[in-house]
Amino acid sequence: MIPRRTFVTSALAAVALPASAQTQAWPSKPIKLVVPYAPGGTTDVVARMVAEYLGKQLGQNIIVDNKPGKGAMVGTALVAKAAPDGYTLLMSVISGLSISPTLYGGGDFDPMGDFIHISIASRNPSVLVVNPTFEARTFKEYVAYAKANPGKLTFATSGAGSSNHLLGARLQQVIGAEMVHVPYRGAGPAMIDTIAGNVPSMFDSLPSAAPHIKAGKVRALAVSSDVRSPAFPDVPTMKESGYPDLISYSWFGISVPAKTPAPIVDRLAREMQAVLKEPAVLKRWEEIGAEGSTMTPAEVTRFIQSEIDKWTPVVKASGAKPE
């Protein structure tokens, strides 16, 4: 006969086992990575690269799930409400966490309280591209055209609330000329229309625009980085063209719902650092003009809070509206 004390101890251990074992065994099934933009844009490009190599590190498939809408807030809100079990990740973006909540007057989530921010997968500048038939050959000529045709020059972006939307709004402020913003549900559809000539110009993140620039489908006029991109050394910066106020970067990270167990958060942080050291990832980032980050989750959290503090007054001052 088993002594009563031993039986009780064993029973309690059995009751405690499932939750503990679930964390220790993570991941035991495929993981979903929610991308709050449509396929084809920079967020999607970065997400699919991360999904491939993070999946290898974790030994599980990571399935990219595109959920565009409302300036990246639709997909972001979905993850905020997901079970905190490590099986739903967010490709967090500057728009969804730092810009759109102010632009749309709030949202269904708290950018800081509803998430644990784990990693910044890449940071990159924006680029202004035009259809090859557009008459402006330089950034200065583009600005001159905008001034000479107030309210007529249109520019596409991945959507209202994106960093590229704010960059276009800031350009209008700086040059004192009105332009027309044409928001899309992702950079992919916006680029298709720019290539087709349905819109003459587009502000896009450099990684998603890179292959189209290299293929000659669009012409790059300027990048928003502080210095020229090594991937496109012949493309000048907006700063050197006389507009230092237009320095701007977008970023893409990995976040999970708040209350995700610490062992899972720690594992994701370690594996993301390994992913960002992969030679293939480093090469890909170099090709598309992106750069990785070695920030810890605590540093990422402070960084995202600083981005919220930075962009909130910019959104309010720009007069930008959701469209």
Image (cartoon, rainbow, N blue to C red):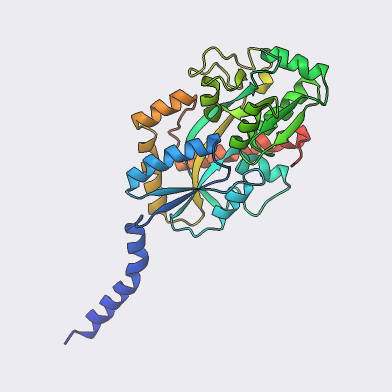
Kindly identify the residue that appears in the image at 64 percent across and 18 percent down.
Answer: 132
Q: Can you say which quadrant of the picture contains the N terminus?
A: bottom left
Q: How many marks?
A: 0
Tell me if 130 is positioned left or right of 180 in this view: left
Residue 237 image point, x, y percent: 60, 16
Kindly identify the residue that appears in the image at 42 percent across and 50 percent down.
Answer: 265
- Name of the residue lying farthest toward the left: 1
Residue 30 image point, x, y percent: 39, 54
Above or below 192: residue 1: below
**Residue in front for this viewpoint, 243 or 219:** 219
- Whether residue 120 is visible, yes or no, is no
- Whether residue 192 is visible, yes or no, is yes
Tell me if 20 is positioned left or right of 86 in this view: left
Residue 47 image point, x, y percent: 48, 40
Kindly identify the residue that appears in the image at 67 percent across and 35 percent down.
Answer: 311
Kindly identify the residue that appears in the image at 73 percent across and 47 percent down.
Answer: 105
Tell me if 148 is positioned left or right of 221 in this view: right
Above or below 255: residue 181: above
Q: Looking at the rendering, which quadrant does residue 23 occupy?
A: bottom left
Residue 29 image point, x, y percent: 37, 57
Q: Looking at the rendering, which quadrant does residue 163 occupy?
A: top right
Q: Can you say which quadrant of the picture contains the C terminus?
A: top right
- Name of the residue lying farthest toward the front: 196
